[in-house]
Amino acid sequence: AIQLTQSPSSLSASVGDRVTITCRASQAIAGVLAWYQQKPGKAPELLIYDASTLQSGVPSRFSGSGSGTDFTLTISSLQPEDFATYYCHQFKSYPLTFGGGTKVEIK
Amino acid sequence: QLQLQELGPGLVKPPETLSLTCTVSGGSISNAAYYWGWIRQPPGKGLEWAGSIYYSGSTYYNPSLNSRLTISVDTSKNQLSLKLTSVTAADTAVYYCARKGRRGSGILPFDLWGQGTLVTVSS
């Protein structure tokens, strides 16, 4: 199975900060990676797929990059509603896998 | 607008069988453009893909659950089902059903999720 390692596991940031989360795959997955946002008590929501394609309706302050084994999710200017946990997800091959998550907290 | 709604027992005793259904409303589970899946999340932990199914019946299971898991589709009821046998406390989780698209010979990520249902395994 392809393992996804996210870093950091948590971070504290202020409104307006630029935030970067990384995801490393245990083997090359081209660009077949997605990012999700999950708020407490809610289902995950798809933010980005194919490493850099913004899902419809997602604010443009979210962006993704990377290919192969190293990927990045960037929030250009953190907003109050962005405090949540973020997961990367590879859909290149079965079994589908998720990263361990990055919790973004208010500083 | 398509919606997914999970239904489960809430509490299951070990080593019984956990049974969940997911009703698809606002669209057809037989839509050839989509696969359907189950993802679970233990309290306070991350996401784990359990398995996926195509309306035709083709299934894909997580090897960690393969021998205990069965996923099926009832097109007449527009429902997706999960059965997990011999449950233990480690199976306590919020279980989500979700939809993912097809793309050529490949797949897209899960883009629509149900609200989830908490299943607790305890005697």
Image (cartoon, coloured by chain):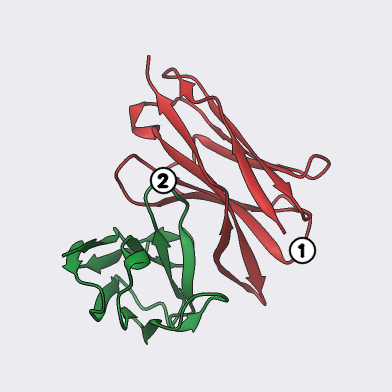
- Quarter of the image where the N terminus of chain B is located: bottom right
Q: Is residue B74 left or right of residue A63?
A: right
Q: Which residue is mark 2?
A: A41
For residue A2, above or below residue A40 = below
Q: Chain of mark 2?
A: A
Chain letter of the residue carrying label 1: B
Quadrant assignment for the C terminus of chain B: top left
Residue at 79% from the left image edge and 39% from the top image edge: B77
Callout 2 secondary element: loop
For label 1, the SS is loop
Furthest residue in direction top, as rendered: B123
The answer as to whether the residues below labels 1 and 2 share one chain is no
User: Mark 1 packing: few (<14 Cα in 10 Å), some, or many (20+)?
Assistant: few
Q: Between residues A78 and A54, which one lies in front from this camera angle?
A: A78
Q: Is residue B60 visible?
A: no
- Rendered view: A84 above or below B10: below
**Quarter where residue A22 is shown:** bottom left
Q: Which chain is red?
A: B
Indicate the amino acid at tag 2.
Answer: Gly
Residue at screen point 26% across, 67% down: A6
Chain A rendering hue: green
Residue named by callout 1: B32
Q: Amino acid at mark 1?
A: Ala
Which residue is pictured at 45% across the width and 25% down the height? B86
Provide residue B26's location: percent of width, then percent of height. 76, 54
